Image (cartoon, rainbow, N blue to C red):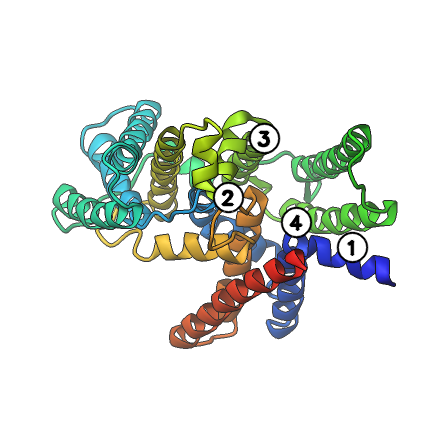
């Protein structure tokens, strides 16, 4: 019993929100009388929260470094407006329009990174100014009017599907789900072997079995739900690719280790030879890139660019990261944690909307959940320090 308590205590930060997500899903499945697990609603849940999921990946890197980016909602609006000028007004081919908008996102992120890393302007002030600037840019570009619709090729990124039906079931969803379960099993086994190789502490085998079973059931449920509807959303494939790439960067590259080091203890990182300014520049440039991608996802899903797009998105992304296990002090967090946090927010929004809960009460509940996540972070720190 003591060993189990130690095991849970040592992994409470890593798996606490995954367990919480499971309970939240079950709760809303009961309260919505089964509507939450409806195949169409599962697909809508992914699509409606895809832009927050993308932004949460970039924001997690920023928060791990010890900062926040307040500008991303306005960057989403400005880059979305830019797609209207390029693709809708001037007929730029979709692929070139997408590439140009991504480049602009990189330039916006680099603009923030330059002020923060070179001119040493505090990130809070820099990104707050960016919030005002790029919201104004969006208004100027659109002149206060919405623009659309977009070509089908552009919308595919946000609302398209990949499918191949056999009877009434999409086989692509089931095959990808099976592949994901096999991949999780493989990486868990490899991780255990790697820890043994370097004489690191390894969790009991039953813990790994439970972990694989939990993820397997979750993936199996989603795969089954998607196969009963239109298949695999294109945006889900993009998200899986982003999670894989950024998880690899953070866990297996020098840049990832440096990001954690800067967030954990910046003075010590400087003394160890890490170029802190370079890391700051990289994370904010990357945030601009992902905000531009999120901007295109938003306008693609809505099929229109609007001056009010992106309102409050920065708060949703920040909340998702803290709920997903990021530390307010920096240096702690995972890309998968950011995704889990965003899904917690998404399931809550979706479930409360289905229940008909007024928007005012929804905001109160989300605020309490965020506050609870920060309290959980403080509790986890105390447990790990004891």
The answer to whether 137 is drawn above or below residue 113 in the figure is below
Q: Earlier in the sequence, mark 1 or mark 2?
A: 1
Residue found 55% across the figure and 37% down from its top: 243
Circle 4 residue: 222
Corner quadrant of residue 116: top left
- How far across and how far down the image is residue 190, in percent? 77, 31
Quick one: SS at disc 3? helix
Q: Residue at x 54, y 55 (%)?
A: 341
Identify the residue position indicated by label 1 in the image.
7
Distance of label 4 from label 3 (alpha carbons): 24 Å
- Marks 2/4: CA distance? 36 Å
Mark 3 highlights which residue? 248
* Helix, strand or loop under label 2: helix
Which residue corresponds to mark 2? 264
Measure the C-alpha gap from mark 3 to mark 1: 25 Å
Q: CA distance from mark 4 to mark 1?
A: 29 Å
């Amino acid at each position: 019993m003591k060993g189990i308590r130690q095991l849970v205590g040592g992994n409470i930060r890593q798996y606490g929100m995954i367990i919480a997500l499971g309970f939240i899903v079950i709760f809303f499945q009961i309260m919505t009388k089964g509507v939450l697990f409806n195949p169409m609603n599962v697909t809508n849940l992914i699509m409606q929260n895809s832009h927050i999921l993308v932004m949460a990946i970039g924001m997690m890197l920023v928060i791990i470094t010890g900062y926040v980016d307040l500008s991303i909602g306005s960057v989403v609006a400005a880059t979305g407006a830019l797609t209207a000028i390029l693709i809708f007004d001037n007929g730029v081919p979709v692929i070139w329009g997408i590439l140009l908008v991504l480049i602009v996102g990189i330039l916006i992120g680099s603009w923030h990174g330059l002020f923060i890393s070179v001119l040493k302007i505090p990130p809070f002030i820099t990104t707050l100014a960016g919030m005002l600037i790029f919201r104004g840019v969006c208004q100027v570009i659109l002149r206060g009017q919405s623009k659309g619709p977009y070509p089908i090729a552009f919308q595919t990124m946000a609302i398209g599907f990949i499918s191949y039906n056999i009877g009434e079931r999409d086989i692509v969803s089931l095959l990808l789900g099976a592949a994901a379960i096999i991949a999780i099993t493989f990486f868990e086994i490899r991780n255990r072997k790697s820890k043994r190789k370097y004489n690191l502490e390894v969790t009991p085998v039953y813990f790994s079995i439970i972990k694989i079973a939990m993820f397997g059931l979750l993936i199996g449920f989603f795969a089954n739900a998607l196969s009963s509807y239109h298949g695999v959303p294109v945006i889900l494939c993009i998200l899986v690719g982003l999670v894989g790439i950024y998880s690899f960067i953070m866990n297996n590259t020098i840049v990832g280790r440096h990001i954690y080091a800067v967030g954990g203890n910046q003075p010590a990182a400087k003394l160890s030879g890490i170029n802190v300014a370079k890391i700051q520049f990289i994370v904010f440039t990357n945030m601009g890139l992902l905000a531009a991608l999120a901007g295109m996802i938003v306008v693609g899903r809505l099929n229109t660019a609007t001056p009010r797009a992106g309102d409050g998105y920065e708060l949703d992304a920040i909340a998702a990261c803290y709920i997903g296990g990021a530390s307010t002090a920096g240096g702690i967090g995972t890309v998968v944690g950011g995704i889990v946090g965003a899904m917690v927010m998404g399931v809550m929004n979706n479930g409360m909307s289905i229940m008909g809960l007024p928007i005012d009460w929804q905001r109160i509940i989300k605020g309490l959940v965020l506050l609870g996540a920060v309290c959980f972070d403080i509790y986890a720190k105390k447990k790990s320090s004891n």
